[in-house]
């Protein structure tokens, strides 16, 4: 082959492969955009998982309510016992009979 024929073949190959190169460039750009979007989605998901760890579960809420109820009962019992002692002391000091006792 002559030099001119090689140059002609080279030009034909360039012309034939140019659309393929453009398509590869476009696909590469699209892949880069997709990768960036995927990174953003992964970051958002990681933030959501971190936030969800802070949200109380149903079990957590039930346990907290049960603990609150227990504390409230204990506080009420203590308060009632205190009132009973005060009333008993008043009855004793004033010689007032307890109407609940027979």
Image (cartoon, grey):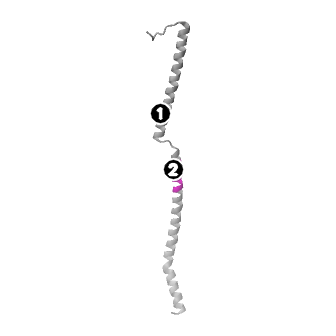
- First reached walking from the N terminus: tag 2 or tag 1: 2
The single residue placed furthest to the bottom in the displayed view is 2
Q: Secondary structure at mark 1?
A: helix
Task: Decide: is 52 above or below 81.
Answer: below
Query: Which residue position holds label 1?
Result: 66
Choose between 77 and 24: the one closer to the eye: 77
Question: Which residue is most to the top?
Answer: 95
User: Residue 81 location in percent, x, y?
Assistant: 51, 20
Give the residue at x 51% y 75%: 21
Which image quarter: residue 101? top left
Q: Which residue is mark 2?
A: 49
Q: Nearer the viewer, mark 2 or mark 1?
A: 1
Would you say the residues marked 2 and 1 are in contact, meaning their CB atoms lie under 8 Å apart?
A: no
Among the 4 quarters of the image, the one containing residue 90? top right
Above or below: residue 93 compared with residue 13: above
Q: What is the span of residues highlighted in magenta in the rendered image?
A: 41-50
Residue at horizontal 52%, vertical 13%? Answer: 88
The percent coordinates of residue 93 (x first, y second) are 56, 8
Q: Where residue 39 sits: x, y (%)?
A: 53, 59
Residue 46 painted magenta? yes
Residue at (55% x, 15% y) in the render = 86
CA separation, marks 2 and 1? 27 Å
For residue 95, above or below residue 39: above
Task: Name the quadrant of the C terminus.
Answer: top left
Residue at screen point 51% across, 53% down: 45
């Amino acid at each position: 082959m002559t030099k001119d024929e090689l140059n002609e073949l080279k030009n034909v190959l360039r012309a034939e492969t140019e659309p393929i190169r453009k398509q590869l460039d476009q696909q590469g750009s699209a892949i880069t955009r997709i990768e960036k979007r995927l990174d953003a989605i992964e970051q958002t998901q990681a933030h959501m998982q971190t936030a969800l760890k802070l949200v109380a579960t149903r079990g957590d809420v039930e346990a907290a309510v049960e603990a609150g109820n227990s504390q409230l009962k204990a506080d009420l019992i203590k308060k009632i016992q205190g009132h009973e002692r005060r009333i008993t002391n008043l009855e004793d000091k004033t010689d007032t009979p307890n109407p609940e006792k027979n």
